[in-house]
Amino acid sequence: MHWWYLFAGIVFEVMGTLCIKQASITNSYFWAGAVVILYIISFTLVGISVKKIDIGTAYAIWAGFGTVAITLLGWIVFKEFMSIQKLIAVLLIVVGTVMLKLEYA
């Protein structure tokens, strides 16, 4: 169950980060408020997840998958440049976080 909290925390963190980009484009208080609310929810969910998951593992997975998702969504949604180097880096992050999860398998 705690892995679901961690996954939900990642989703809310990604949404919050996307709102940061949107806030910088529009200068809207709506998006800035959304950032604060989404990050509060994300940190709360990650806080619940670390009751059963090692903090180092939880944080690495949260940050790693969040980085991967933001990189890919930045490329898809905001048309940001995706180089081969970025793609390799994203793949290495995925490999590293999967290896951390396999410790619990």
Image: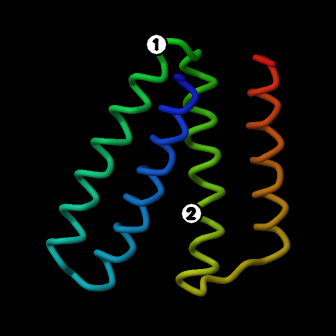
Q: Answer few, some or many: residues within 10 Å of disc 1's Cα (few below 14, many 20 plus, some between 14 and 19).
A: few
Q: Is the residue 69 above or below the residue 84 in the image? A: above
Q: Position of residue 47 (x, y in %)?
A: 39, 25
How far across and how far down the image is residue 87, in percent?
80, 67
Are the residues at dot 2 and dot 1 in contact (C-beta closer than 8 Å)?
A: no
Q: CA distance from mark 2 to mark 1?
A: 26 Å
Query: In the displayed structure, does residue 65 sit left or right of residue 52?
Result: right
Up/down of 18 relative to 53, above or below: below
Residue holding disc 2: 70
Instruction: Tell me the amino acid under the disc marked 1.
Output: Lys
Tag 2: amino acid: Ile
Q: Identify which residue is drawn at 75% across, 47% down.
A: 93
Looking at the image, residue 3 lies above or below residue 50 = below
Q: Quadrant of the N terminus?
A: top right
**For the point 28% across and 75% down, which residue is it?**
23
Q: Which residue is pictured at 57% across the width and 51% down the height?
A: 66
> Could you say which is closer to the camera, residue 9 or residue 83?
9
- On the image, the x and y values in percent for residue 70 come to 56, 63
Q: Which residue is mark 1?
A: 51
Which quadrant holds residue 80?
bottom right
**Looking at the image, which is closer to me, 3 or 87?**
3
The image quarter in which residue 22 lies: bottom left
Who's the residue at 48% across and 42% down the image?
A: 8
